[in-house]
Each structure stands twice: as structure tokens, then as C-alpha cells.
Amino acid sequence: MLKLDIIEHSKSPWSSPVILVKKKNGTWRFCVDYRSLNKITKKDVYPLPRIVDALDSLSGASLYSTMDLKSGYWQIEVDERDKEKTAFITPDGLYQFKVIPFGLCNAPVTFERMTLKGMKWKHCLCYLDDVIVYATTFEEHLRRLRMVLQCIRSAGLTLNHEKCFFGQSRLTVLGHLVDKDGIHPDPGKVEAIQEFPTPKSITQVRSFLGICSYYRQFVHKFADISRPLHELLKQDVKFEWKDDHQLAFARLKSLLTKDPVLCFFIPGDKTLIHTDVSGYGIGAVLVQIQCGLEKPIAYASRSLTPSEKKYSTTENECLAVIRAISKFRPYILGRPYTVITDQHSSCWLANLKDPSGRLARWALRLQEYGVDVVFKSGRGHQDAYCLSRNPLPKIEEETFEDILFLNTITNFKEE
């Protein structure tokens, strides 16, 4: 690193220890333990892209090019005043970094802030040191690629040619495989799930749930299915692998290894949210009518808390609707959509007298959204419509109860 002009000799009053981490190939990775420095560092809250937003930005594309910024952090110089803070101890003396080292808490956001400012989200996707150019047509792809490469050259950045791939029809990014049809789990991760042995300890259960949870958006009712395995992780629970654990283990394996596909969200297509409740959890699926068929966009689920398990079925159905529209808020806010449920759910709030506590909070929460709820009866499969499209008016004289009633569900019809 000294020959590469990455570090320099230091007389700093600061120092951090060095840790050598063994890689899978048997070589060693040089790391500096900056935990003490990070504790007293003022945190930069510049946001990293959410994985779901990054994947959604690729909607409609059929060609992808990926580029890797070589030794990404090392392409950004450290401010002269802060170099001494990066100092580390070696048997040969004290050294400090001239460029951003790995391990500083603000390194990722600093790099993200710098990367192709003004171009990301419009012409490309940047996630730390990965740059992805995407387009629908070959001509558009070439145009965007030229713009991005020119920007990289002008910024004086260097690419790792061994990790650059151009004009691909499929792309593996952020643990997912993306193509024109939608989003798939990474085949490599799927293989790891398929080959995962039956857990013999709590640690192995936790590892299996960890890799499966990363793809929970692909599995309807994930929380319900995985519940027996999560029960094993509770304190004071003795590890005993029983039939219900094996069933949940096998079920998750099966669902995640059948190449599940989530389609891209298309603004303008009819959007539906299906909600459901079990005795243990709530779930929802966001779908769209594309080419005349219901296509899944995302699944969401979670377990009920001990207090929520005491709610009535109707209350939990209402909770499922509230959680669903909150989870899918980026897709539905400002757009028409329909919630389909097998209970009156949010509709019954319209006829509830003097709502208080959580019921009042739920009713107020719905005011942000234009909720169109379709009730599908379990007996007759009859549809009933429940509309909530009124914004909160600027009223000073009415009581809280009056405002709550007027601005939640204003029309309920059952046929």
C-alpha cells in the first residue's frame, strides 16, 4: 500500500489496531479495526439506496451493462485534516491512509454521495462501487453507456475490467437475478438453500432463516410458514427438532427453489392488494393485472405479537389492511388501487361509534390513502365496496369523533 501511495508514514496521536482476516482462498485480508473511532464519529445520514428501490428502477429494461469501480474507496482522497485519524499500528511503525479505508462508518455513504452525481436513477443505477446501465432498446443502451463512461472518465475514476460486463439480457445484482420478465432469487443463493442440511442446532436454524428471510418477499405467508422455526429461537426453549419444524424447513426450501418470479410494477396497470390473517400472523400480496393476468409484485407478512393475538378477527383483518398499505406505500400513494379482504375490515370503522385508541389511529391512518376495499364473503363470494377518498377537511368546530367519522370510510355497500 505504501508503494501504491495508499498510505503514508504517520506521527498521529490517533491509532487503531490491525486485524488480518483469512479469505476463503487461503489468502489474508488486511483490515483496520476502527470501532473506537466510529463511536465518536459524527454520522453522515446520506441515504443508501433501498434494495427494493434499486431493483424496481430496472423495470422495463431488457439490456444491462455492469461496471465495477476498482478498489472503490481508494479512489477518494481523505481530507488532509482527517488523515491522522485513520492511523493504524504495525510492527514497522505508525501509518495513516491518504484515501478512504475500509471500515470507517461514513465510508459507504461518502462513496455513494460521490458516485455519478446527477446521473444515477436517470441513466444508471449506482450501489456503492457497482454501476448498472440499463435500457429498453440497443440504441438507448449505447447512448446511456457513452454518457456514463464519459462521466466516469471525467471524474478520474478507474474501472475493474475483469468485473465489467456489457449488453447482457440478464443481470445478477444485490442477491437477485433480473431480466425482462421480472425479479428472481440469485441461483447461487437458491442452491445454498436447496443444499442446506437439516439443522442440528439453534445456530444452524438462525443461519437458514437468515438466508430465507432475504427472499421473504417471494414467499406468500412467509411469517406463518417459518413460525415453527422462529419458535426454536426463543429464550429458554430447548432445541428439539420435531415434525412441524421439518415441515416448515421443507416447505421453505420448496417454495424458494421453484424459481419464483416477482414482476415489475407498471404505473397505470390495475393494482390490487390481497390481505389475509391467520391465528399467528398477517399477510398481504401486491398484484397487478398485466396482460389480463394477476401478476405478483411483492409479498409481505409478519407474525402477530402476543397482544395482537388477543384482537378479534375483524380487528386483525383491519390491522392487515393498515400494514399492507403502509408496506406498499411507495407503489400505491397517489394511484388508484383496490384492497381485497374476506372480512369487513376497514369498512366496519365507518359504523363504529366513538372510536378510540388504536381504532382511532387506524382510521386516521387510512385518510392518507384513497382506499377502495372489496369485501369477498366466504359464503357467497359477494362483493361489497367500501370507499375512503375524502381528505381531512380544515374544520375547527367539529369534535374529534365527527372528523374521524367524516374522513374515514364514507360509503359501504354489500350486495
Image (cartoon, rainbow, N blue to C red):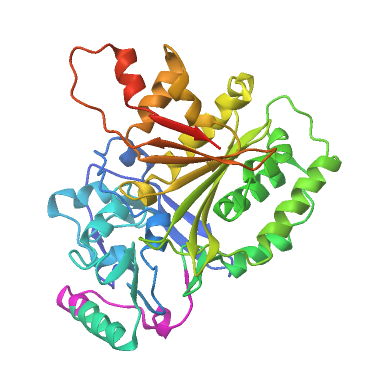
Which residue lies at the image location 29% right of the left edge and 71% below the top edge?
124
> Taking the image as drawn, is residue 401 in sight?
yes
Q: Say if the magenta span includes residue 137.
A: no
Which of the pair 172/33 is nearer the observer? 172
Q: Position of residue 69 (x, y in %)?
A: 32, 72
Q: Say if the magenta span includes residue 158.
A: yes
Which of the pair 109/347 is nearer the observer? 347
105 displayed left or right of 289? left
Q: Quadrant of residue 121?
A: bottom left
215 displayed left or right of 10? right
Q: Residue furthest front?
A: 415
Quadrant placement of the N terminus: bottom left
395 displayed left or right of 400? left
Q: Is residue 245 above or below residue 190?
A: above
Which residue lies at the image location 17% right of the left edge and 15% below the top edge?
396
Q: Is residue 68 above or below residue 43?
A: below
Q: Position of residue 245 (x, y in %)?
A: 79, 42
